[in-house]
Amino acid sequence: MALVIPDVLEESCATRQALERLAAKWRILLIYALLAGPQRHAELRRRLPGITQKVLTETLRNMERDELVERRVLKDTAPQHVEYALTALGKTLQQPLAAICTWALEHPSATLNE
C-alpha cells in the first residue's frame, strides 16, 4: 500500500487546515499541559511561563471552538471556578505529539537554533 501524501500547499487540504490550527502559538504547549489532566486557568498560566492571561483565554476559547478542549464549570456562583480538559478529539493528538518528541530526541541537532 502506497503512502498517500496530501497536497498541503492547497488551501482546501484538510491536512493543511489542521496544521494551521495546531501551529498557532501556544496550542501544542497547552495540549501537552492538558495531557496531564484537567486544569484551571491559573494552573495553566503557571505551567506556561510567558503566556498572558488574555492570550491564554483566547487560545482556550479557540481550542474549545475547534473541539479540542472543553470548559467545565466547577462553581457557578461568584467567583466562578472553571477547569479545562482535552476532549476525546484533543486526546487523539497524544500519539502524534509523542512521535514528534521521539524525533526531537533522536535528532537533537535538528532542534537547535543556529
Image: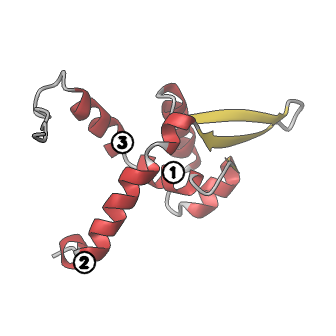
CB atoms of marks 1 and 2 within 8 Å: no
How far apart, in angstroms, are the residues tagged by discs 1 and 2?
23 Å
| 41 on left or right of 8 | right
Q: Which residue carries the number 1 mark?
A: 30
Q: Nearer the viewer, residue 89 or 21?
A: 89
Q: Callout 2: helix, strand or loop?
A: helix
Q: Picture coordinates of residue 6 (x, y %)?
A: 14, 33
- Residue at the spot 10% in from the left edge and 32% down from the top edge: 7
Mark before the other along the chain sequence, 3 or 1? 3
Q: Callout 1: helix, strand or loop?
A: helix
Query: Residue 78, can we see it?
Result: yes
Q: Picture coordinates of residue 101 (x, y %)?
A: 36, 65
Mark before the other along the chain sequence, 1 or 2? 1
Q: Callout 3: helix, strand or loop?
A: helix
Q: Quadrant of residue 9?
A: top left
Q: Which mark is residue 108?
A: 2
- Residue at the spot 59% in from the left edge and 47% down from the top edge: 53
Q: Picture coordinates of residue 15 (x, y %)?
A: 24, 33
The amino acid sitting under disc 3 is Leu
Q: Which residue carries the number 3 mark?
A: 22
Vertical position of residue 68 compared to residue 106: above or below: above
Could you tell me which quadrant the N terminus lies in? top left
Q: Which mark is residue 85?
A: none
Could you tell me which quadrant the C terminus lies in? bottom left
CB atoms of marks 3 and 2 within 8 Å: no
- Residue at the spot 54% in from the left edge and 45% down from the top edge: 56
